[in-house]
Image (cartoon, rainbow, N blue to C red):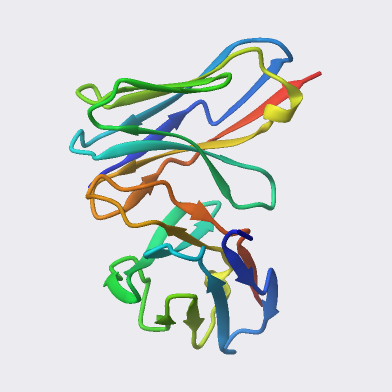
Amino acid sequence: KQEVTQIPAALSVPEGENLVLNCSFTDSAIYNLQWFRQDPGKGLTSLLLIQSSQREQTSGRLNASLDKSSGRSTLYIAASQPGDSATYLCAVNQGAQKLVFGQGTRLTINP
Amino acid sequence: DAGVIQSPRHEVTEMGQEVTLRCKPISGHDYLFWYRQTMMRGLELLIYFNNNVPIDDSGMPEDRFSAKMPNASFSTLKIQPSEPRDSAVYFCASSPRRGRGGETQYFGPGTRLLVL
C-alpha cells in the first residue's frame, strides 16, 4: 500500500528566506506527483504536477523536483512571502487518477 | 468558469439523520472525485466517477455512504444514517479527460460536516 510522508509537519521561517518542503513515498510505481496548497477553510489548489518521466517543474518562485527511484520529491520556495503561508500537500498518482496524499506541511512565513 | 461548486458549505446534524452533500463539477470535466479530510486520517479518496459511471468506490467507509452522478453536471454523496465519526470536511474535485498519466484535479471549497 502506498504511503506518503511529509516532513516537517510544520515550519515557520522569516520572510525572504528560501525553503524546502519534503515528500517521500514508498512505492515508486507512480504516474505523477502533484503539489497542492490549502488555505484554512478552503479547498486545495494545484501548484505543480510532475510526470513520472520528468525530474522537475517550475512555476514562478516554486520549483518541484522528483526522484522516483528513491521515492522523494521536494518543493522549493524562493524568497518566501507572508502570502505563502498555508498547508502544502503532496499527492502521488498511482494510476487511474487515484491520488494518495501526504499529511501536509503547515508553513508560516513571518513578516 | 466558477470552478467546482459544493453545497452546503456547512452542515450540522444529529446522529441518525440523513445527510446529502452536493457537487457541480467544472463543465467539460470527465472525472469527479469525492474526498474526506480529517485531522487523524488526512485526505482520503472515497469514490470517483468517469463519465458519470462509478469507477472505484473502495474508499467508501461502509454501506451508510452512497454516491450518485445522475448527469455530467451533478453528483451527490449521501450518508444514512449519519454518525459522529462521520464529522469531517468533504471535498469534491473534478478533472478533464487525459491519458493514464492523470491530470490536475480541481477542488471545490468543501462541505464541513458536524454530526452531533
Which residue lies at the image location 59% right of the left edge and 59% below the top edge?
A: B3
Residue B12 lies in what quarter of the image? bottom right
Q: Check the image and report above or below for B110 versus A93.
A: below
* Quadrant, the N terminus of chain B: bottom right
Q: Position of residue A39 (x, y in %)?
A: 66, 43
Horizontal side of B84 relative to A102 (left or right) equals right
Residue A24 coordinates in the image, percent (x, y)? 34, 29
- Residue occupying the point 60% across, 11% down: A18
Query: Residue A30: x, y in percent?
Result: 23, 39
Q: Quadrant of the C terminus of chain B?
A: bottom right
Q: How many marks?
A: 0
User: Splitting the image into 4 quarters, where does residue B29 fall?
Assistant: bottom left
* Residue B41 makes an appearance in the image: no
Which residue corresponds to the image point at 50% horizontal and 66% vertical from the top-left? B27
Instruction: Determine the residue positioned at 37% across, 71% down.
Output: B61
Q: Position of residue A63 (x, y in %)?
A: 47, 20
Question: On the rendered structure, is B83 left or right of A14?
Answer: left
Viewer can see residue B94: yes
Camera-nearest residue between B36 and A44: A44
- In which quadrant of the rendered view does residue B114 lie? bottom right
